[in-house]
Image: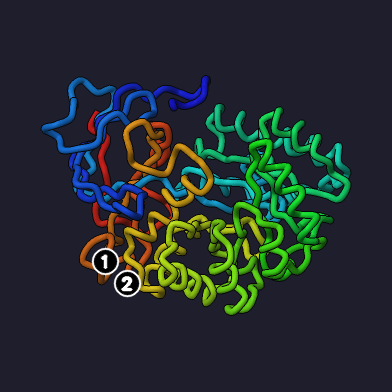
Amino acid sequence: MSGPAGVERSGKVVIRNIGLLLSGDIDRPILEADTLVVQDGVITQVGRAADCDTSEPHRLIDARGTALAPGLIDSHTHPVFGDWTPRQNQIGWIESCLNGGVTTMISAGEVHLPGRPKDIVGVKALAITAQRAFEGMRLAGGGGGVRVLAGAPVIEQGMVEQDFADMAAAGVRLLGEIGLGSVKAGDEARQMVNWARKHGMQSTIHTGGPSIAGSGMIDELVVLEADADVIGHVNGGHTSLSYRAVCTLCEKSSRALEIVHNGNERIAILTARHAMELKCPHRVILGTDSPAGSGVQPLGMLRMIALISSMAEIPAEIVFGFATGNTARMRDLPQGLIEVGRPADFVFMDRAQHSAGRDLLDSVQLGDIPGVGMVMIDGLVRCQRSRNTPPAVEVPVIVS
């Protein structure tokens, strides 16, 4: 489960003096451990210092009592090519989100590409090209090394099963938001979702009012009939369905409930509460739905965590799990959990200076964004004190 060939190897990394270790697993959100050992980008030991082999590390990091969590996974982004977005004509947005603790981004479609092809050959070609380009960019260290899982075709009428088989054979593993193209009917979407699923591709459906030209209203009946793997921005992107309709989706579907930053905040809070009441919190995953008309939010994931924890009154350690382990399991990703054998993608945090909170978790539950002190991907330090978050009380130090 080490990083792909071409990525710099971390060697042996020892992280000591961890003050709070968040697992990403909402069933066991806090681990009784203060030390992590990594070998070539993979977690090999989690425990107390006395029980771990901390000898002769290539890199030694003193966490200095700060919290360590899995790197945040943004479940809903719209990359195009490189670290640039034509939607806002902004360069460096992916690396900027790294400074907000994001180590993985998942494409919901490269829909903002100027002149995006809508013929079937073009749809397939764009998906394969985007998948290759973003993997290649990561291998070259672009975007801060963030894992951008791209190549998410927006399905169009006229596609047949062989089209999905072709894309899957070429390495495409995602569908873009259903409803952003010409496929908008539930029965038509369901057939294509089933073809995609048969060939190992995961699907996401747009939910709510239209977001860009060419998209349309997708209501709860279409979402239920299509039965995509992820109910994309269940709180709207931007315009939400009614709370009654969202409750129907929570109660009648078993699929992932994706809550996003660029959506209706009231429905975001109510959806999280309803999932807790229904005892299905494992279905809740978080994203930003950026870049979008409202811009790029480098701290969007942290803002969502603070919003849901404080306003929905859900313990912060659980909400961090929504943004990491839940997404990992719903999307079948190796990263997102602190376990032996998982990729060493981490974010180090502490409460922001002068926060009213007693510690990191208390400050987040009071609605404050934490300070990011370091981010690692594949066991490699990708940024240190964040240029975007408020300054943390304490930050980790690279000892050697």
174, 256: nearer the viewer: 256
Q: Which residue is mark 1?
A: 362
Residue 229 against residue 52 in the figure, above or below: below
Q: Say left or right for 385 vs 102.
A: left
Residue 367 versus residue 339 in the image, above or below = below
Residue at the left extreme? 50
| Whether residue 367 is visible | no
Label 1 – label 2 distance at C-alpha:
6 Å
Amino acid tagged 1: Asp
Disc 1 + disc 2, Cβ < 8 Å:
yes
Name which residue lies at 27% across and 50% down: 67
The quadrant holding residue 374 is top left
Picture coordinates of residue 72, whole percent (x, y): 44, 49
Up/down of 48 relative to 212, above or below: above
296 and 202: which one is in front? 202
| Image coords of residue 251 (percent x, y) | 54, 69
Q: Is residue 10 visible?
A: yes
Query: On the image, numbered disc 2 is attached to which residue?
Result: 366
Indicate the quadrant where residue 63 lies. top left
Who's the residue at 20% across and 37% down the image? 47
Quarter that holds the C terminus: top left
Q: Secondary structure at mark 2?
A: loop
